[in-house]
Image: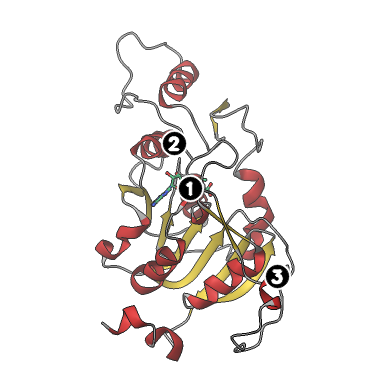
Amino acid sequence: MNARSPSETSTTPSPASPASPRERIEQRVRELGPWFHNLDLQGVRTAPDHFLHDYPAVKWRSFADALPADLQGASVLDIGCNAGFYSLEMKRRGAGRVLGIDSDEHFLRQARFVAEVNGMAGEIELRKLSVYEVGSLRERFDVVLFLGVFYHLRYPLLALDLIHEHVAGDLLVFQTMQRGSSDVEPLEENYDFWEKEIFDAPGYPRMHFVERRYSGDETNWWIPNRACSEAMLRSAGFDIQSHPEEEVYICRRREPGRREEGLPWSRR
Ligand SMILES: C[S@@+](CC[C@H](N)C(=O)[O-])C[C@H]1O[C@@H](n2cnc3c(N)ncnc32)[C@H](O)[C@@H]1O
């Protein structure tokens, strides 16, 4: 995701602002663009020409039923919250504390405006923070959303490890773009050094490295196949509970086991 443009930080209309509430929203939407989240702000669309159309509403509809309908009192961390679509949905399900973090102030400005237009300004906390900095939060959350961020990272497994170590309390909702085979090769515990063919199996866990750009976006770095998403989630300490949609996994945090305790970096 590489949308960039300087824009005003204030959501208060200037004296020259248009008179009607709708016109004011249209003007702020223009000032705060470009948008990735195509939201409906009182009839004003933030990204009407989105290449994925009604996104992320269309994605959310495909896995919304896999999450508890009632999140009464649950704490939620929305990593890479962008303009805050999912943070709002969590609030609508009754979540208590909702914290949205994003490494890009451009999207946080949008999220503040979206919360304000939806009358939730005081209810969703928004903070500029990278996934690599979640340790500084010193808090675990009942639900962690990690949607659409994984493939934008140069160090994706580190991010999963940090989420597990510092902020995941119970549920992790994970979504990633995936490319390559959707087969999952059943793997043995260990292979002989001379076993080479297994690496050519389409369903072997595989990450595709993007050196230049993919989909015109230089922030796409690593795109897993299905087997790789699942293996990395397990390896980072998450048990996959359900896979309601091709790209989405609902996981439960597992306490570190023998393998994780034994990783060389975690022994230091
Ligand atoms: C494709 S958008 C996904 C937005 C939203 N989570 C969704 O699924 O619709 C990726 C978001 O991740 C943010 N992001 C990228 N790298 C990040 C990082 N290291 N830490 C936190 N957020 C990051 C981007 O700024 C962007 O808002």
Dot 2 beta carbon under 8 Å from ligand 1:
no
67 w.r.t. 169: above or below = above
Residues at marks 2 and 3, CA–CA distance in whole angstroms:
47 Å
Residue 52 in picture, x, y percent from top left? 65, 38
Q: Nearer the viewer, residue 9 or 196?
A: 196
Residues at marks 1 and 3, CA–CA distance in whole angstroms:
43 Å
259 w.r.t. 135: above or below = below
The local crowd at label 1, few if under 14, some if 14 to 19, many if 20 or more residues have their Cα within 10 Å, is: many
Question: Which mark, by number, is residue 114?
Answer: 2
Residue 16 in picture, x, y percent from top left? 33, 8
Question: Which mark, by number, is residue 88?
Answer: 1
Left or right: 253 in relation to 141: right
Left or right: 98 in relation to 222: left
Q: Nearer the viewer, residue 209 or 69?
A: 209
Left or right: 179 in relation to 214: right
- Asked if the residue at tag 2 contacts the one at tag 1, i.e. Cβ–Cβ closer than 8 Å, the answer is yes
Three-letter residue code for mark 2? Val
Q: Quadrant of residue 142?
A: bottom left
Mark 3 = which residue? 200
